């Protein structure tokens, strides 16, 4: 994994706006329509190439495929593994339930989005279709040629987030379900690393899980679940190189009250002990921007090789942050762990689910540009240029 050796490097969390033609293809697939697979992946190759090109034009150093071929960050697994079927009940955050009129407006706004299936685990989890992952890897490799990118990463769901949003109806316990998921996902993790990419593990379960799935538990009971999910992740990553893995922590990429989000301070020590060398986390939105101070107060708990990738631009607001604000945010973290161990990132993905991004596609890339501009300002000051 690259470090910010002579300037602050720029990356983001992963998902980017998909062209309407791609959204329509994903919607048809989700609806159960049989598609021409060769034509489908050929279209995805074009979309990935465009996403990489636009990232580079915006000044992003460490790029991704924008998750163009995935309908959602965890829901994509039913196309790759057996054992998932049916439909699970919709889940709502406790914060949204406190404001039912706002929740109703939010649901109405989403009526035009792709209807995404949220299956349950109803059988033994086994790899059944390797083509989606092979195509994702090939498409990103092709897009990287002559792109000038410093590095590339590819997203994969954590065992914990799959278990949270695709509930167990087959295994004798949640622990057994997590173990099965850890073994299944290990294949995907290894393939991404073997392709030469940085592996990004998406872990909304470690924060968002508190106010969504485990909202009826107290904090102590949730923390017990968090440790179990981290153990499953450690099992899945055993023996894999920590220096080529990064982890994304998330309280939910939606514009809502978020007043029931668990405080970073409560999960800080556990999250920082996880194997991945880099941690991407929300640090720009109004609910979590203040928590940079947690890193300062609890600095002794940060491993000496951990790379911090704070979100310095919001992923659910159409405000374009001023580059000076971006620079100030980066400089705060550089003062805590050193300039070489900080990169610039976004709070979350900009298109978590296909066709349902909160930020206008043109503004997304403007935000990435302002992130790069802010990183350049911070770099000039941090390296005294």
Image (cartoon, rainbow, N blue to C red):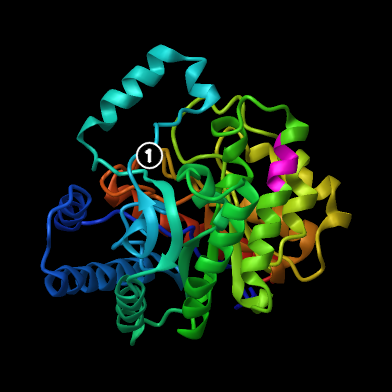
Whole-percent x, y for residue 238 in the image: 68, 73
| Quadrant in the picture for residue 241 | bottom right
221 relative to 73, above or below: above
Whole-percent x, y for residue 134 in the image: 34, 78
137 relative to 51, above or below: below
The residue at the point 37 percent across, 45 percent down is 119
The magenta span reads 222-226
| Quadrant in the picture for residue 117 | top left
Asked whether residue 169 is in view, the answer is yes
Mark 1 nearby-residue class (10 Å; few <14, some 14–19, many ≥20): some
**Disc 1 designates what residue?**
318
Q: How many marks?
A: 1
Left or right of residue 271: residue 345: left
The residue at the point 51 percent across, 66 percent down is 185
Whole-percent x, y for residue 99 in the image: 47, 14
In what quadrant of the picture does the C terminus appear? bottom right
Residue 225 sits inside the magenta stretch: yes
Front residue of 215/59: it is 215
Front residue of 64/188: it is 188
In what quadrant of the picture does the N terminus appear? bottom right
Outermost residue toward the right in this view: 300
Magenta span dominant secondary structure = helix
Residue 286 sits inside the magenta stretch: no
**Please, what secondary structure does the residue beneath circle 1 have?**
loop
Left or right of residue 279: residue 62: left
The residue at the point 13 percent across, 54 percent down is 33
77 relative to 183, above or below: above
Whole-percent x, y for residue 273 in the image: 77, 59
């Amino acid at each position: 994994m690259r470090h910010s050796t002579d300037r602050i490097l720029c990356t983001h969390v992963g998902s980017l706006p998909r062209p309407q033609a791609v959204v329509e293809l994903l919607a048809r697939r989700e609806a159960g329509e049989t598609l021409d697979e060769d034509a489908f992946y050929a279209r995805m190759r074009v979309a990935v190439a465009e996403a990489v090109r636009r990232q580079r034009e915006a000044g992003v150093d460490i790029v991704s495929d924008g998750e163009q071929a995935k309908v959602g960050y965890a829901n994509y697994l039913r196309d790759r593994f057996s054992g998932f079927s049916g439909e699970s009940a919709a889940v709502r955050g406790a914060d949204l339930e406190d404001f039912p009129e706002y929740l109703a407006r939010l649901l109405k706004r989403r009526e035009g989005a792709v209807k995404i299936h949220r299956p349950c685990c109803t059988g033994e989890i086994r790899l059944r279709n390797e083509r989606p992952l092979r195509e994702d890897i090939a498409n990103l490799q092709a897009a990287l040629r002559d792109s000038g990118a410093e590095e590339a990463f590819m997203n994969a769901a954590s065992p914990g987030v799959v278990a949270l949003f695709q509930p167990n109806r087959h295994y004798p316990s949640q622990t057994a379900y997590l173990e099965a998921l850890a073994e299944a996902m290990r294949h995907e993790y290894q393939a991404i690393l073997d392709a030469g990419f940085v592996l990004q593990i998406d872990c909304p379960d470690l924060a968002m899980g508190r106010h969504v799935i485990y909202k009826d538990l107290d904090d102590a009971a949730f923390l017990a679940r968090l440790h179990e999910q981290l153990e499953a992740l450690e099992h899945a990553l055993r023996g894999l190189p920590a220096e080529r893995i990064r982890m994304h922590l998330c309280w939910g990429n939606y514009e809502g009250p978020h007043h029931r989000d668990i405080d970073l301070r409560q999960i800080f020590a556990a999250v920082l002990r996880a194997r991945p060398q880099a941690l991407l986390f929300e640090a720009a939105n109004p609910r979590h921007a203040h928590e940079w101070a947690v890193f300062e107060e609890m600095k002794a708990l940060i491993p000496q090789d951990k790379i911090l990738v704070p979100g310095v631009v919001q992923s659910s607001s159409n405000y374009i942050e001023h580059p000076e604000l971006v620079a100030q945010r980066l400089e705060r973290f550089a003062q805590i762990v050193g300039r070489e161990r900080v990169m610039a990132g976004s709070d979350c993905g900009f298109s978590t689910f296909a066709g349902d991004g909160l930020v206008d596609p043109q503004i997304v890339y403007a935000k990435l540009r302002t992130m790069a501009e802010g990183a350049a300002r911070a770099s000039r000051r941090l390296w005294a240029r």
